[in-house]
Amino acid sequence: MSSARVCCAGECAVAEAGHVAPEMPFLKPFRDKRRDSRSHQLAKGGAELRGTGASGNRTEPKAAPRVLSRRDGALPAEHLPLILEVAPNADYALLDSGAGQKLEQYGPYRIVRPEGQAIWQKALPAKDWDRADAIFTGDTDEEGIGRWRFPKTPLGETWPMKHDGIDYLGRFTSFRHVGVFPEQASHWDHMAGLIAAAKRPVKVLNLFGYTGLASLVAARAGAEVTHVDASKKAIGWARENQEMAGLSQKPIRWIVDDALKFAEREERRGSRYDIVLFDPPAYGRGPRGEVWQLFEDLPDLTDLCRSILTPKPLAVVLTAYSIRASFFAMHALMRDTFAGMGGTVESGELIIREKSAGRALSTSLFSRWVA
Ligand SMILES: C[S@@+](CC[C@H](N)C(=O)[O-])C[C@H]1O[C@@H](n2cnc3c(N)ncnc32)[C@H](O)[C@@H]1O
């Protein structure tokens, strides 16, 4: 099974054409030969030898080799498949889809974007699609907002949006994204519920945090949040969103760093979290060129996420998209990694329910451990 929050189809093509902005390090998949040699070593030697210099082009050496072995203890209970659904709501709606496109309402604007999974026919008539305010053209001669067409009036790069009472900015980006992944709302609601129910101080780590909606939801729910992303630009947008949301006084640390390195450092420093969210791309780069490859690095990062939990943790939530894998793979990894911790591993897909004909658009795979 492959799942698409579509950072892949269009953007990979764009990436290969050499148009990737360095600020958006999650959009450029290619095979890294040095990584290949590391895989080869792993295949030969078995153990994970991080920090030996064999692990790709990370520029700073790793402190200690991480040796992965199967965790002892009973496997957590399991719940799958679990399909988490976002229905049309006042802030966001998938209005219609089909013929390789989707028509969405983001606050005041109707937006048309390519959608590779919409292999069915559109349910709404052309006149409804023709009323779009913005259409992603993907024109590779253009940059940024130039890749969008505005059939009615030219729009600015950002516009005011809301999520469940939290104000933030939608944005027309070069890579067809609009600054938010609405399907993540299922995780945000779940996390906010856990934070509220804990009735104690809760620390949340949001890795690959992008424009920060999850961090804002967590902070509003009362958590102390650490938000990490490799992109300075994305961190800037997230800070703007914090201001927009009127949550400037809430304790959020905004950190530009490589997610894996940051987690390693937190492990060494003894920093601990009650909830960890990680939503890694298939391929990405840290701020100093560190290469993130999901299939190579996810086992280490998942293991690290377990290591940096407090003695009474609440949850660890993994989402993945644009990969050729089934949620069963993530489920097995999470269940093995959380052996001996009790709780339940729940895995499945995040979907968006379409308003016109009720079809489900799958966006990503997820697996979460809940205490
Ligand atoms: C698709 S976004 C995650 C979306 C986010 N969870 C949300 O719901 O808004 C992927 C993010 O990972 C970041 N990224 C890519 N490689 C990274 C790395 N090695 N370390 C940290 N962040 C990275 C990108 O800058 C991007 O913001």
Image (cartoon, rainbow, N blue to C red):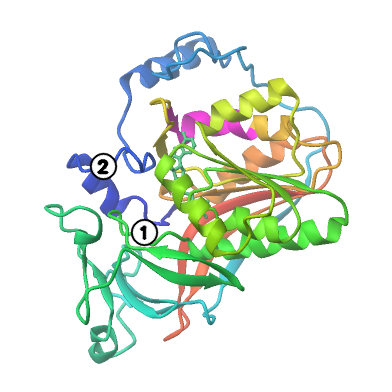
* Three-letter residue code for mark 2: Val
Task: Tell me if mark 2 has few (under 14), some (14-19) or many (20+) residues whose alpha carbon lies within 10 angstroms of its own.
Answer: some
Q: Is residue 297 magenta?
A: yes
Span colored in magenta: 291-302
| Secondary-structure class at tag 2 | loop
Numbered label attached to residue 20: 2
Residue shown at 22%/79% (left/top)? 153
Q: Is residue 42 left or right of residue 20?
A: right
Counting from the top left corner in percent of width and height, residue 329 is at 56, 43
Residue 145 shows in the view? yes
Mark 2 and mark 1 lie on one chain; the one further toward the N terminus is: 2
* Viewer-nearest residue: 188 or 200: 200
Counting from the top left corner in percent of width and height, residue 352 is at 50, 70
* Three-letter residue code for mark 1: His
Counting from the top left corner in percent of width and height, residue 110 is at 34, 79
Q: Quadrant of residue 193?
A: bottom right
| Secondary-structure class at tag 1 | loop
Residue 80 shows in the view? no
Residue shown at 46%/9% (left/top)? 53
Counting from the top left corner in percent of width and height, residue 332 is at 64, 41
Q: Is mark 1 within 8 Å of ligand 1?
A: yes
How many labels were placed on the picture? 2
Residue shown at 40%/37% (left/top)? 283
Please determine whether, in this image, residue 40 is positioned above or below residue 308.
above
Please determine whether, in this image, residue 259 is positioned above or below residue 321.
above
Residue for badge 1: 177
Q: Quadrant of residue 255?
A: top right
